[in-house]
Amino acid sequence: MTETVLEIKNLQVEYHTEHGDVQAVRGINYKVNKGETVALVGESGCGKSASVKPIMGEKEANQVIKSGEINFTYQTENGQKTVDLLKISPKEVQSQIKGKEIAMVFQDPMTSLDPTMKIEKQIAEAVKASSPQINKEQLNKRVLELIETVGIQNADVVKKQYPHQLSGGMRQRIVIAIALSGNPSLLICDEPTTGLDVTIQAKILNLIKDIQKSRKLSVIFITHNLGVVANIATNVNVMYAGKIVETGTTEDIFFDPRHPYTWGLLESVPDVNEAVKELPTIAGTIPDLTQPVVGDAFAPRNKYALNIDFKEQPPMFEVNDHHYAATWLLDKRAPKVEIPTVLKRRIEKMKKEAEADGE
Amino acid sequence: MANNILEVHHLKQYFPIGKKKVVKAVDDVSFNIASGETFGLVGESGSGKTTIGRSIIRLYKPTYGEVIFEGEQIAGTLDKKRTSKLRKDMQMIFQDPMSSLNPRKKVGDIIKLGLDIHYPELSKEEKQERVLKMLKVVGLDSSFINRYPQELSGGQRQRVGIARVVIMQPRLIIADEAISALDVSVQAQVVNLLQHIQEETGSAMLFIAHDLAMVKHISSHIGVIHLGHIVESGPTDEIFDHPKHPYTKSLLTAIPITDPIAEQKKQLSDYHAHRHQYVNKTMVDLGNGHMVLDDGSWS
Ligand SMILES: Nc1ncnc2c1ncn2[C@@H]1O[C@H](COP(=O)(O)OP(=O)(O)O)[C@@H](O)[C@H]1O
Ligand SMILES: Nc1ncnc2c1ncn2[C@@H]1O[C@H](COP(=O)(O)OP(=O)(O)O)[C@@H](O)[C@H]1O
Ligand SMILES: [Mg+2]
Ligand SMILES: [Mg+2]
């Protein structure tokens, strides 16, 4: 049975600025089930970070939550409980949820670490925050355990060091250890491997997957790298200009993408197995979100756009009961449009390889 | 060879730190880049990529070795003529366009600066005309002339960074992680742009990056660098199809690809090495220009 851990309904987030109100998140809906990794993917400025900050109760001075619900379900001593994270008090978020039930890992580990404090102290503080009664001996044991959980072998040495003495990959491991200190049920990762070397990135992704399996964690994973999505996600939400434009299982999105924006993102990743003379690109840039969006926000960059795309926001059309896309191309009346040939070839090749391996 | 724009022979770049210690950031590195070709330099952070770029363009004075740029030795003490050639004909695009663009100058003036210094004979109108043409080449409209860098997006700034370099019609472009900070969609645009410019001008390029998929697309030849040493080099397809050195293999298997089934089955190949393992070793030629460091880690 699938248990829903998080359900976001019609979330709208704006930022007040001197140039106008930025409509960073324009009504998004999705669920995260237990044990799933849901990826949020899209170009920078699409509202990925803005859409997860309210889950952690992170409030910036100019942030306004215009509407929505964030229903979070977790286990308490008295059984299962569901709360709307936007309705409960900041105090409740702080004492019940943050760090204990939901934890977050950011792109730059230095923003979450204190440069003046030794690693063991930082992890210990985090452990104490979620279990204030813990005694000294248990605390030390727990700190060592956490350092080992994130794949650091010489825990005794590392715990005595300061953040600047560690490499970027090691720092990110420590941040993950801190995130795990309260035994959360939901982990939000915002570009945790962006900027790391590929080999280190691959190891951190494996680490997150291992931890997730052994602890049955649910994960929201933000990235702009579709290769990373393919590696880690079970479900994918493609975001554009503050909206989810396509949602599905990882297989839906990589083997049967339907939204021209998803095509564009997939195409612009060069294929190491097939040379092309010129890389496909997505022309133009994301729109100015202080201006009202009419129709499909992607229409001006979409070479497959229909007239109606410039006038009316497309609804989420159903491809199957777990795959939806907001493009008028899926309307019954729309002309038949083929997926770009380069992408089509790539997908056919992937399917063949998968079949050959499956035998 | 006559058509090599750049030849680097046994380049070493050491940095003294403290009284007795030295950091051997680049240790005996050799490669050539021919006219119109792109040499991709890949390796983990701290492996010496940026230092190589900075030594070649003479932001550092090489500790040892030869750097031959269009037939001129530029590793040693530079006379006026060579300095001027270097500043004119070799240009570098940096990773962070913001830190390399003067925030108090308008985009038009930033792009024009090189002409002001190195082409004083050009009239004001001619310079203006070239700036406008350059903006068009990099896909920005003429209104950008009067904008300031901080009013631009990351992708737009990187285009300004490229325009400023290309307007000089350099013989060698050094692109140091020039696209790393950009979105994939924008990366593809910038890479296409660089390739068009190269086709038109025949300039050579040293393309430094850690995204191997992009490096594969743009480079004709690749050098894999680890701990200040090139451990493997050769034609791009050779390296990708028949990697020999375990470090190269570990890099190649780590590239995330847009195939969920392959990604989920992927086995990483782990590799560790010590600096001394690479010292005083020679490159072995495997044929077709495919070279690999003979350090005992493969056979
Ligand atoms: N604190 C803020 N003040 C004003 N605008 C903001 C703020 N944070 C984000 N934005 C704007 O909101 C939009 C979405 O940003 P963000 O969620 O950070 O994008 P992503 O994480 O997808 O790169 C962008 O247009 C961004 O400029
Ligand atoms: N000016 C310098 N002084 C001392 N050490 C340096 C200097 N520049 C670079 N290094 C060291 O040299 C090595 C290579 O650095 P770098 O060329 O920046 O690597 P990459 O560009 O591959 O990440 C690193 O260990 C770095 O700390
Ligand atoms: Mg973000
Ligand atoms: Mg560098």
Image: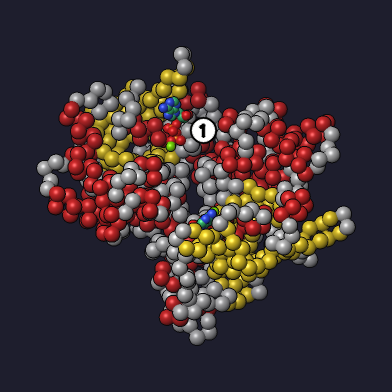
Q: Quadrant of ligand 2?
A: top left
In the displayed structure, does residue A37 sit left or right of residue A129?
left
Q: Which residue is mark 1?
A: B298
Tell me, yes or no, if residue A207 can be seen here: yes
Specify the color scheme. secondary structure
- Determine whether the beta carbon of the residue marked 1 sits less than 8 angstroms from the nearest atom of ligand 2: no
Q: Is residue A254 above or below residue A337?
A: above
Residue B194: give x, y in percent of width and height: 32, 51
In the displayed structure, does residue A142 sit left or right of residue A40?
right
Q: Is residue A303 above or below residue B208?
A: below
Residue A104: give x, y in percent of width and height: 66, 49
Based on the displayed image, in which of its 4 quarters is residue B196 positioned? Answer: bottom left
- For this orientation, the residue located farthest to the right is A78
Q: Residue at x 62, y 36 (%)?
A: A114
Residue B291: give x, y in percent of width and height: 40, 35
Residue A344: give x, y in percent of width and height: 48, 67
- For this orientation, the residue located farthest to the bottom is A333
Pick the front one: B158 or B35:
B158
Q: How many neighbours does mark 1 have within 10 angstroms: few (below 14), some (14-19), or many (20 or more)?
A: few
- For this orientation, the residue located farthest to the top is B19
Pick the front one: B106 or B20:
B106
- For this orientation, the residue located farthest to the front is A18
Q: Residue at x 52, y 60 (%)?
A: A16
Q: Residue at x 46, y 79 (%)?
A: A311
Based on the displayed image, in which of its 4 quarters is residue A307 positioned? Answer: bottom left
Q: Secondary structure at mark 1?
A: loop
Name the image quarter holding the C terminus of chain A: bottom right
Give the amino acid at mark 1. Trp
Tell me, yes or no, if residue B265 can be seen here: no
Pick the front one: A290 or B206:
A290
Subunit of mark 1? B
